[in-house]
Amino acid sequence: MATVIIKRLAKSPFVLITVLVTLAAFSFTPRFPFKSFRNSLQQQVQRLFTVEELALYNGTDDTLPILLGILGSVFDVTKGKSHYGVGGGYHHFSGRDASRAFVSGNFTGDGLTDSLRGLSSTEVKSIVEWREFYFRSYTFVGKLVGRYYDSEGNPTKSLKGVEAKAARGTQLLEKQKKEEAKRKTDSY
């Protein structure tokens, strides 16, 4: 029965063309055609960096990618070399985790740190949003062992605390917006 159907279809030039086009499409398709699948594979094969290792990727060696850390997550920002490379406006972020500077604006010495001590919940929320920007815009390549990830790449209490504080910042901003909207409606 199946043989009869195949013989009938084989006589049709349209079937032959369809089969050839399908085979050609598969042969020219990248090995991992779905970007999200490829990204999930990249995240599974991640590297753990020490502070000293990350410092090597600061844009001064043209043979190495430029890496940036934020809240212990490390991203390849080489495609933004004009910004993150030597002489670029964001070079101070390259080869380190300078999470605090994303909101403090202090791009020198003590300001280039991953410590968020003393920042408000809304400032911490802003840093978490910056990290989300890097996840969307650049390739995640690994984690920085230290304040936010342990030697096995697991989140530390510090990272969990940062994320909880950011959530409080979100709640605070939502509450402020509601109060402001209420004041506007009450004034009419």
Image (cartoon, helix red, strand yellow):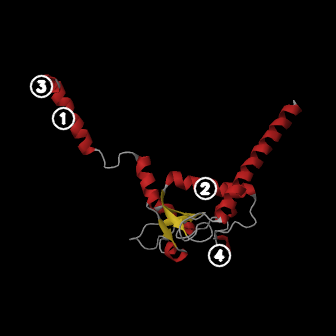
Answer whether residue 128 is visible to the viewer in this image: yes
Tell me, yes or no, whether the two marked residues, 2 and 4, touch with CB atoms within 8 Å: no
In the rendered image, residue 119, in percent from the top left (x then y), is placed at 74, 62
The disc labelled 2 sits on which kind of residue? Trp
- Amino acid type, mark 1: Leu
Disc 1 packing (10 Å; few <14; some 14–19; many ≥20): few
Q: Type of residue at label 3?
A: Lys
Q: Tell me residue 29's x, y (percent).
A: 29, 44
Disc 2 from disc 3: Cα separation: 61 Å
Q: Position of residue 111 (x, y in %)?
A: 67, 70
Q: Nearer the viewer, residue 33 or 99?
A: 33
In the rendered structure, the answer to whether residue 4 lies left or right of residue 101 reads left
Residue underneath mark 1: 20
Which quarter of the figure has residue 113?
Answer: bottom right
Which is nearer the N-term, disc 3 or disc 4? 3
SS of the residue under disc 2: helix
Taking the spot 25% from the left edge, 44% from the top edge, the residue there is 28
Mark 3, secondary structure of its residue: helix
For marks 3 and 4, give the CA distance.
77 Å
Q: Earlier in the sequence, mark 2 or mark 4?
A: 4
Tell me the distance, in whole angstroms, between the alpha carbons under discs 3 and 1.
17 Å
Residue placed under numbered mark 2 in the picture: 130
Q: What residue is pinned by disc 3?
A: 7
Q: Are marks 3 and 4 in contact (CB under 8 Å)?
A: no
Label 4 amino acid?
A: Gly
Determine whether label 1 and label 2 are within 8 Å by CB.
no
- Tag 3–tag 1 contact (CB < 8 Å): no
- Disc nearer the start of the sequence (2/3): 3
Mark-to-mark CA distance, 1 and 2: 47 Å
